[in-house]
Image: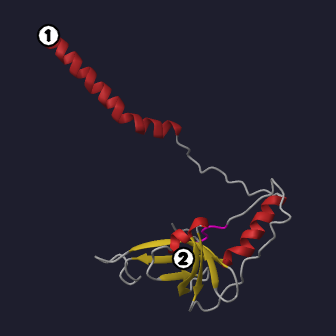
Amino acid sequence: MENRFNRFILLTIAVLLAIIAARPYVFDRLYSATEPRPVDARGDLAEYERATIGIFDRESPSVVQVAGTVGGDLSEAGEEGGGGVKSGTGFIWDRAGHIVTNNHVVQGTGSLVVRLASGEVGKADIVGTTPDYDLAVIHITNGGQIPAPIIVGSSADLKVGQSAFAIGNPFGLD
């Protein structure tokens, strides 16, 4: 009698394991789509969407990537004994090549490079920092063609509830 019970238990366990193993295949057959889903064309854009897209298209060429090394120069970064790399973004402030970025991006760095939206890379020097506001100004020294600076507005006529935009990282990095 005990032998028969043991066989029953083993058979039950084997059937349960077979069901568990076959479940993904059964669900795949029963519930998978046989044809690709249709994709609807994008509808008309709302006015605020057009405005946002316009701001991005106009201002994103002025956004830059800033990278600096801690404890070495950029040629040593990543090598054994080389420094770490800090990076962030900034924006072109004027035609002279001044760039506004965050203080935490440049603080403690040995050398800085700036990558423009065009892909050009140039060296940069720190002009000034204000750690209390986490702001820094750097100057690109050999970046080639400097893009147009961002358009600056006045805060005097802002109203509570107005939209504000920050174009952070169009490079898809970090």
The residue lying at 69 percent from left, 80 percent from top is 93
Q: Which class describes the residues within 10 Å of circle 2: few (<14), some (14-19), or many (20+)?
A: many
- Mark 2, secondary structure of its residue: strand
Residue 31, above or below 41: above
Disc 1 marks which residue? 2
Q: Which mark is residue 168?
A: none
**Residue occupying the far right of the picture:** 157
Res. 61 image quadrant: bottom right
**Residue 85 screen position, x and y as percent:** 43, 73
Which of these two is toward me, 48 or 127?
A: 127
Q: Which stretch is magenta?
A: 167-171
Res. 9 image quadrant: top left
Magenta-span inclusion, residue 8? no
Q: Which class describes the residues within 10 Å of circle 1: few (<14), some (14-19), or many (20+)?
A: few
The answer to which of marks 1 and 2 sits earlier in the sequence is 1
Res. 126 image quadrant: bottom right
Label 1 – label 2 distance at C-alpha: 76 Å
- Mark 1, secondary structure of its residue: helix
**Residue 43 screen position, x and y as percent:** 78, 56
Tell me if 76 is positioned left or right of 33 in this view: left
Q: Which mark is residue 66?
A: 2
Which SS type dominates the magenta stretch? Answer: loop
**Residue 82 screen position, x and y as percent:** 33, 77
Tell me if 56 is positioned left or right of 50 in this view: left
